[in-house]
Amino acid sequence: MRIPLLLTLAAVLLAACNAERSAMTDPPPLPDTTAWVVAPVTLRWALTPTPDGSGEVTEPDVVAGWRDMPFTMIASPYPASDARLERPQLWTSRDGITWTWSDSVAHNDSVQTSDPDLLVAGDTLIALYRQNAQSDVLVTRRSTDGHSWTAAAPELTGTLFTLIGPAVIATAESWDLWVVDAYPGGCGAPGTQIIHRRRTIAGWSAPEAIAVGVPGWVPWHLDAAVVGGVWWLLYDAYPAAWYCGHGGAVFLAISADSGRTWTSEPRPLLAPGGAYRHVYRSSVVAFGDSVQLWYSGQTPLGPWRVATERVSIADVLARVH
């Protein structure tokens, strides 16, 4: 008698999963983004060889000047949009376009690790990324050569979907960390919060929600940098009626008081359409009066690719305001 009951329960659960999947694959039409186009955006596709041979990567974070290398990038391979294969890897480049794969950064191939962020402290690289299984754990690993890494050190642990897309601005005295809290909906959350914490010698501060975002769009992944003496928070977001894997655009928020208050710019740096049908986690590095941006996202034909542009700060601000 117990077998039919188990089969019935399994059928109910399967039907629920299929209904959720159907709802996620047949969302409403995308918002009209044509009014956002204020100037042509010239992108150059990056060459990102991967150990699996696909060349598909997502969630890049780029730093400049580590050990005399112009550009170093951490990102996750993402062949055929298979999240089970995300494992942060390291690349180096002389021009920010053609990349050489260095080594794997992930410490455990038996669990999903994703959402990497990269920091430089002298000659040391610090990789911060998310291990997500039954809970979210942010871990750090350190390397002086890009090949040998220290053991993974847990930084923060939280409920699943509460430590998404970490981004850090670091000084010698402290780290300022931002993450996205999408509990309990995860990828399909109709709304998220951006949470700030500060780490000092005394440890991590209590979490604090910050007011960043554009109405109707759900923040998902982050990058943070100091640009022209002010703080930038770069975040991809998806329309509230959609979910994290479709229709995303990359927006910018700016703080002139070291992160205490933020101004969310109303237009995106890059919207879906043209090169990308979905724009995802992206990265920014400042060079004097200009920045270089690396976007990740899904192209119209399906593969996940990284593209880059070099643009003046003044032109960025004109595009997003």
Image: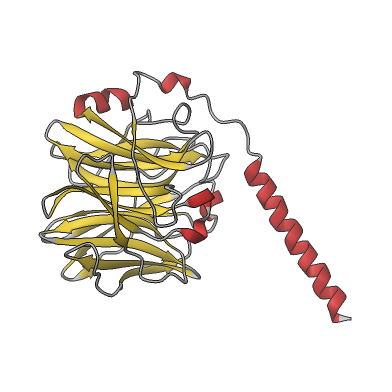
| Residue 202 image position (x, y, % from top left) | 18, 71
Compared across the picture, whether 35 is left or right of 228 comes to: right
- Give the image location of residue 23, x and y in percent: 67, 45
Q: Is residue 170 visible?
A: yes
Vertically, is 13 above or below 260? below
Q: Which quadrant is home to the C terminus? A: top left
Task: State the residue in front, 170 or 286.
Answer: 286
The number of discs equals: 0
Determine the residue located farthest toward the right in the rendered image.
1
Q: Position of residue 55 (x, y in %)?
A: 42, 47
Q: Residue at x 50, y 47 (%)?
A: 191
Image-quadrant location for residue 41: top left
Judged left or right of residue 144, residue 84 is right
- Residue 132 vs residue 317: left or right? right
Residue at 49 percent across and 51 percent down: it is 79
Q: Residue at x 31, y 24 (%)?
A: 319
Furthest residue in direction front, as rendered:
53
Q: Where 94 sits versus 276, above or below?
A: below
Q: Is residue 169 above or below residue 125?
A: above
Indicate the quadrant containing the N terminus: top left, top right, bottom left or bottom right: bottom right
Q: Residue 225's x, y, as percent?
A: 22, 45
The scheme the figure's colours follow is secondary structure
Question: Can residue 196 be seen?
Answer: no
Residue that sits furthest to the bottom in the current view:
1
Taking the spot 13% from the left edge, 39% from the top edge, the residue there is 229
The one of 69 and 216 positioned closer to us in this rendering: 69
Q: Nearer the viewer, residue 115 or 110?
A: 110
